[in-house]
Amino acid sequence: MCGIVGYIGPKPSKNIILRGLEALEYRGYDSAGIALVDSKGGQVFKQVGRVNGLTQEVEEEASNAGLAIGHTRWATHGGVTVANAHPQMNSDHSIFVVHNGIIENFDELRQRLEEAGYTFESETDTEVVPQLIDYYLKQLPSFVAAFEATLRDVRGAYSIVAISTAEPETLYAARLSSPLVIGVGEHENFLASDPSAIMDHTKKVIYLEDYDVAVITKDKVDIHNLKEDTHTSPKIELLDYENEKALLGDYPNFMLKEIFEAPAAIRSATLGRAVVEQNMVKLGGLEGVLGQLKYIDRIVIVAMGTSYYAGLVGEYLIEELADIPVEVQLASEFNYRKEPFSRSTALLAISQSGETADTIAALKKVEDYGVLRLGIVNAVGSTIARMTDAGVYCHAGPEKAVASTKAFLAQVTVLLLIALHLNDGRSKRFRPLIEELNELPAKAQAILDHTDEIKAIAEKYADYRDFLFIGRHTGFPAALEGALKVKEISYLHAEGYAAGEMKHGPLAMIDENFPTFAIATDSPLLEKTYSNIQEIKARKGPVLALATRGNKAITKFCSDVIYIPETEPETQSILQVIVMQLFAYYIAIKRDNDVDRPRNLAKSVTVE
Ligand code: F6R
């Protein structure tokens, strides 16, 4: 959730760190800080708020030191204050530490250190790390020995980077369940929690694995795995990441840009995979496990948030098209329940970032069960992509806005492809769906071409405090996703419900101040949804319907209607969600909210 960046080399590190932090700010943005070290000593700059609040002071006052670390924070332990911002330090401010994750036993460690005479300046869990390093340095011969002794005491999930005034040429880094990547340069090395922070400088990277401790100088990277007690020779990989795509261009913010990338995201997800001419679905990422896939009789999907809702759409698609029972679980729940799990079950993790802690933990939970672990991941080279036995990349391109948009569309597209792949041409739906997948980008574009109409309707609804989203079949998870988009960027109350549930409770909330966004696109269940709408209207609830173009009848009994192009039932949720993304976006804009960085949230939830 927090962002980490580090540099060691001949250049003044301050600018590299500042630019890196700006690139990482979407991950956490309540405070930021930098520590620099050279032979004259250390300097620290910390600030509550965005990185740009730090820029002027650092540019003017920071030394040209070639060693530095930086951090953008998303608060877990302790409020948003300068004292709680990272880097955290030992008492004499000679050791500087930035940390992403949670140190679960920090209370116990802090007590131990206090008994040994240490005093603390912050409320963070992180501060125990520099203090503990300090403690061990007094007993052990080297910084690395003290760093490793500290890591052995720490329980939790972390990526930690430390520097010390005693060693102005070395970066120390460690990873456990939280991503950290080293960027390899010419007589310089970089470090970051996300490659986007360093990719302007180098495309050569080393991904740290769990329990790795790295000692990094400008010419050397040494990695010691604490668990195996082995020194591995670092494996250098080439970054496959298109930075240009992460630039804003003419858009006012990343969220709008990413919503407008819907056609491209759907196209990239299907490109070379849904081949109409050959009437086939090719998924290279699954080829290595085709033999195993034949024996799969149950799929458990694990994911969080928007990816979970994509999984719920996938449940309908895989069950209906491939005839394999599917269960979708929030990874955070899956991790702490006992359930029978046979080897003919496949676990399918869905994640945009590939770094979500709960989803990673779900994959770890089944590590010893001998089950097939599959992934649908957007971020190439991420932890989940590397942990799974096989998988299919979304290819939606980098998603920077905190609220997930185009990734959902790509996830559902990939789930449909997987359902068709498992169906292997057996169903009558195979051919029409492959054809439709190729038509879908144009239909997504047709919706975007009507953005002004959606904007006008959203603005009309922007002053309500509560929203209900209802749908049936795949429209139900689509409704859940629509409600989530409103919640996270407009901070308004919104709930998603299966339309059939209305009479079982939610209808009690409805009055003239409680509008419903009803997904009422063409389907065999449309008349049933009409009845639900009528019941809402009878209680004076305003209804905004989402209908298929050509449906005039619906205008007679709904306050407003937004149309989407006609599409197959299996692809409807993709088009429905684009409309709801725009609806939520324009409500949030009307309310003057920062849509890219909604309050209290961060991209990539790397702690449980
Ligand atoms: C909502 C959103 C989150 C993520 C969730 C899972 O807009 O972005 O709900 O979907 O945190 O993240 P990933 O997909 O990266 O595992």
Image (tube, rainbow, N blue to C red):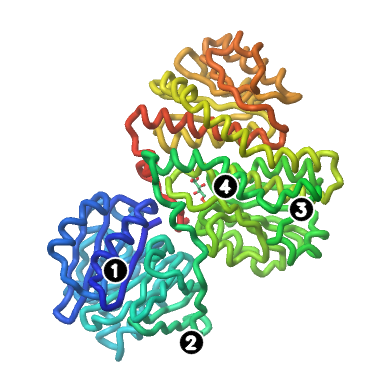
Residue mark closest to the camera, 1 vs 2:
1
Q: Earlier in the sequence, mark 1 or mark 2?
A: 1
| Of pointers 2 and 3, the one earlier in the residue sequence | 2
Q: CA distance from mark 1 to mark 4?
A: 32 Å
CA–CA distance in space, label 2 to label 4: 37 Å
The residue indicated by pointer 2 is 231
Relative horizontal placement of residue 510, taking residue 13 as reference (left or right): right
Q: Secondary structure at mark 3?
A: strand
**Which amino acid, by three-letter code, is at mark 1?**
Ile
- Mark 3 to mark 4: distance in Å? 19 Å
Q: Locate residue 17: give its quadrant.
A: bottom left
- Mark closer to the observer (2, 3): 2
Say which residue label 3 marks.
298
Of the two numbered discs 1 and 3 on the same chain, state the one appearing first in sequence: 1
Report the residue at 76% width, 53% height from top.
298
The image quadrant that residue 475 belongs to is top right
Residue at numbered disc 4: 307
In the displayed structure, would residue 129 be above or below residue 20?
Answer: below
The residue drawn where x is 73% and y is 25% is 523
Q: Would residue 509 be found to the left or right of residue 135 on screen?
A: right
Q: Nearer the viewer, residue 448 or 497?
A: 448
Label 1: which residue?
Answer: 69
**In what quadrant of the picture does the N terminus appear?**
bottom left
Q: In terms of sequence position, does the residue under pointer 2 or pointer 4 come before the other?
A: 2
Residue drawn at x 35%, y 42% is: 599
